[in-house]
Amino acid sequence: MVPPEQFSKAYSLFLVGFNVGMSLSPVISGFLLSFYPPALFLVWAAGSAAYALLVCALPADEMRPEEHGGGRTSALRRAGRSIGEPYRSPVLVAFLALVFLLACVYLQVNSALPLDMRRSGLSPGDIGIVLAINAVLSIALLPLVPKAVKGMGDETPLVLAATLMAVGFGLNAFADDIALFTVATVVWTLGEVLWAPMSATFIAVRAPEGRVSTYQGSYFFAWNAAFVIGGPVGITVANAYGYPFLWISLLVLGLGVAAGFKSMTRIPDFAVTTAKRPTPAASPAPEAATAPGTTPRSQPRPKSQAPQSQPQPREST
């Protein structure tokens, strides 16, 4: 829905709205768990129902020309080709593999981190406050990201984000009270703030016309695969070897991911793809020269192809 040069700003604003809710939810959850735990599920259900009503009130998506006709079989065939398309790019395959590994680090915030906090004596309310700090910082800092990364290479924000996440989760190895867990949270939150809009922008600017949502889908596939695998593995490692061992292991893994992002520049297609990125000065292509079934990048995208944010991801980020 926005031109390419506004991608990172749009993602930042999207995540500001997301984190407004996130700043309230941990505190509310901590209170409900202390007062009447079943109420937490009732609040979740009410929130989901309200979201559904709001979504139903949105305007209908517009269909691209190639989506008309052809029957159900043709539509399924096109969908199958689209799903596999991102995996034919060596740059994106490397990027998605690194996304999976970094998500295994970051998504411990949904599994091992609260358990370690509880083991260290923090109450549910204290845990909610620590996680709310993450959301509040995100709200304050996300709008600043586009200006902060201006002039950086595509890989630089990703390297910085992975490094900060690695160090932040590594600091949990030394945390045993709310103050130290808060310090660690501030560090990995800085990494999250850089990661969220810039990782989504990285893949969006590499998507062909009309394929942004498909490419974002490959990103969330990698992210959610880590959600399924990383959380249980993290808890298993912590139970077997202790939480300090887990956090140090994640520090090493995160730093390895940062090195991987830096190494992506050596992939031949990396520089070529970056050079093809549209710039704000690019003039709109004449309508007659536009390929059938595509939307010029200089024009607003149909809602059905709007870039989606990353999660993130985790449901609570």
Image (cartoon, helix red, strand yellow):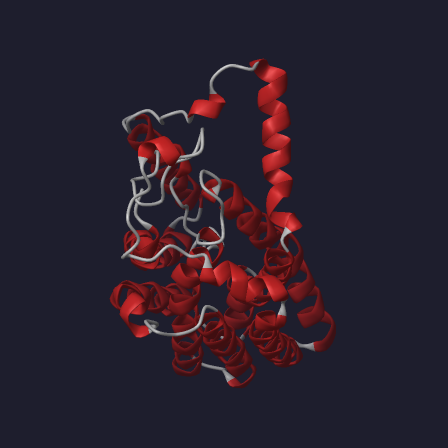
Identify the residue at image location x=35%, y=34%: 303
Residue 312 falls in which quadrant of the image? bottom left
Q: Residue furthest right?
A: 240
Say whether residue 279 is visible. yes
The C terminus lies in quadrant: bottom left
Please provide percent x and percent y for residue 178. 41, 78
- Is 311 in front, or is 294? 294
- Depicted 55 relative to depicted 191: above or below: above
Q: Is residue 60 above or below residue 237?
A: above
Res 192 → quadrant: bottom left
Left or right: residue 103 versus residue 192 is: right
Please tell me whether residue 181 is drawn above or below residue 63 in the rendered image. Answer: below
Figure label count: 0
User: Between 195 and 23, which is closer to the camera in this rendering?
Assistant: 195
Which picture quadrant has residue 72?
top right
Camera sees residue 49: no
Q: Quadrant of the N terminus?
A: top left
Residue at 50% over, 75% down:
159
Q: Nearer the viewer, residue 158 or 32?
A: 158
Residue at (40% x, 33% y) in the render: 304
On screen, residue 142 above or below 216? below
Residue 277 in the image: state x and y as whole percent: 42, 57
Image-based side of 295 in relation to 265, left or right: left
Residue, far bottom: 174
**Residue 275 coordinates in the image, percent (x, y):** 46, 62
* Residue at the (45%, 38%) spot, across then down: 210
